[in-house]
Amino acid sequence: MIRNFIAGEWRASTANQFFPVLNPATAEPLGQTPISPASEVDEAVNSAHSAYERWRRVPVGDRVQVLHKLKARLESDLEDLARTITVECGKTLAESRGELRRAIENVEVAAGMPMLMQGNFSEDIASGIDEFSIRQPLGVCAIIAPFNFPGMIPFWFLPYAIACGNGVVVKPSERVPLTMQKVFTLLTECGLPADVVNLLNGDRHTSELLISHPLVRAVSFVGSSAGARAVYALAGAHGKRVQCQGGAKNPIVVLPDADIDNATPVIADSAFGCAGQRCLAASMAILVGDARKGFGDSLRQAAAQRTTGNGLDEVQMGPVISPESRNRILSLVDRAVSDGARLTVDGRYPQIAGGELGNFIRPTILEGLPLASDVTRTEIFGPVLSLHEVDTVDEAIALVNTGSYGNMACLFTRSGDAARKFRSEAEVGNVGINVGVAAPMAFFPFSGARESFFGDLHGQGRDAVRFFTQEKVVVERWPKDWTRQF
Ligand code: NAD
């Protein structure tokens, strides 16, 4: 049963609506996500708030001891957690393990909170007057996560929010609720006062109740751009601090001097890893000048050779999340073809032994897709790569900057000069140079720009510390004759 964790205990929801959770590789039912009603949102927020009043007074050096224990528990349970991610989300076991490593990395960084949340001090800003700043926790922080990284994405926020002294409510995606059930069990074994973190299951309506709850101070959202925009507006209307990471349409530019042998597997992995369901997945390869000669062939070959199947087996790619998602991807591919694209690798209707009921699509390559087609600018979020040809780096950069998203852009080249120009002019939050998935380490912000991000401070690293604390400035004078007794 999928339960909520509220006020330090596992509770069956009183919901009368449920979302069916199915294994994307087999369609086996895994559970029913309760769509928690307003009363449970209220209980979760109240629990986090009363816990915060006590937790904020625990010294930060003691607070981070919980994170040291949590890291050890995540390490010891890594295989079990990875299996859960694969079963509910579909990605391969290797990808699930990689996702968890990224989660653990955030716990490690947040464990440095005693230094990270230090303030600043200036003595004698005027005669006898000192000024300093301190960072204090906010209160209740809500974390709303997407389906594609059930283990990692809550960790872009959760360890920082806890270490800064906040109370937390996590709402996982209704499509993948199982991983957080396990993570919360571990959290309760790490010495954290159990009501500091609360797990609330539900859908967008549950999120909306959470965001507009008067005791919620801050909202961290990751999901589609439509969701990000809506959450940004709702949170803003209710006066909340908010950070919303949205969708993506990531281009990879290949210059003629790029090393084909090294770049091809990296680009193929970017496009088809996690079945293309990564916000840092390459979805357009822009081949410049003579790069079109070699790279087209090598990418087609890499796509056609990628093994696809149940992520628990020895395969390189799993299914997409749901039949609806698969149908949406197929209809976008059909639209591309009717707009003039050629399907040079067609993975639409694969035969996967034992996967007859799964949501499988094999790697698919589109060529000759007109730039005027909507599909060029639409996030497909599946294993589909379109190849485009231009003559110059300037044209490639113009194409990178044409779309509305700005999550990631990558360049493959041996030219330092071209790389400098690209990293300066690409209007995106994360840039990769000879790297296919420019995923920032936990000590950097997970950036994003334009329609891929709404807000100011991002998840991870110092941005997360600033997001989960309020900076207070104190100007202090102690006249001599008040205190000098000697
Ligand atoms: P989604 O927007 O459908 O849902 C994300 C979460 O928000 C879920 O928990 C859902 O219940 C909730 N939700 C959905 N609509 C909402 C609304 N209007 N108001 C409040 N809550 C709402 O996203 P998804 O399909 O689960 O995830 C895939 C999307 O997430 C893709 O677009 C992908 O690019 C994006 N993504 C972005 C990043 C990033 O860092 N920029 C990372 C991972 C995924």
Image (cartoon, rainbow, N blue to C red):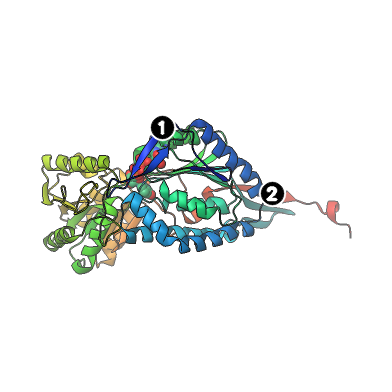
In the figure, 136 relative to 435: above or below? Answer: above
Residue 49 percent coordinates (x, y): 60, 41
Q: Alpha carbon of mark 1 to alpha carbon of mark 2: how far?
A: 53 Å
Mark 2 C-beta to ligand 1 under 8 Å: no
- Residue 140's disc is none
Quarter of the picture for ligand 1? top left
Q: Residue flagged by tag 2: what amino acid is it?
A: Val
- Residue located beneath label 1 in the image: 17
For the N terminus, give its image quadrant. top left
In which quadrant of the rendered view does residue 18 lie?
top left
Q: Confirm whether residue 448 shows in the render.
A: no
- Depth check: give the residue in front, 6 or 433: 6
Mark 2: secondary structure: strand
> Neighbour class for label 2 at 10 Å: few (<14), some, many (≥20)?
few
> Neighbour class for label 1 at 10 Å: few (<14), some, many (≥20)?
some
For the C terminus, give its image quadrant. bottom right
In which quadrant of the rendered view does residue 64 lie?
bottom right
**In screen coordinates, is 316 left or right of 18?**
left
- Residue 475's disc is 2
- Depth check: give the residue in front, 139 or 353: 353
Mark 1: secondary structure: loop
Dot 1 and dot 2 residues touching (CB under 8 Å): no
- Depth check: give the residue in front, 93 or 232: 93
Residue 98 percent coordinates (x, y): 37, 61
Residue placed farthest to the right in the image?
486
Residue 268 percent coordinates (x, y): 23, 59
In the figure, 167 relative to 445: above or below? Answer: above
Q: Residue flagged by tag 1: what amino acid is it?
A: Gln
Q: Name which of mark 1 and mark 2 comes first in the sequence.
A: 1
Callout in the foreground (1, 2): 1
Q: Confirm whether residue 175 shows in the render.
A: yes
**In screen coordinates, is 98 left or right of 186?**
left
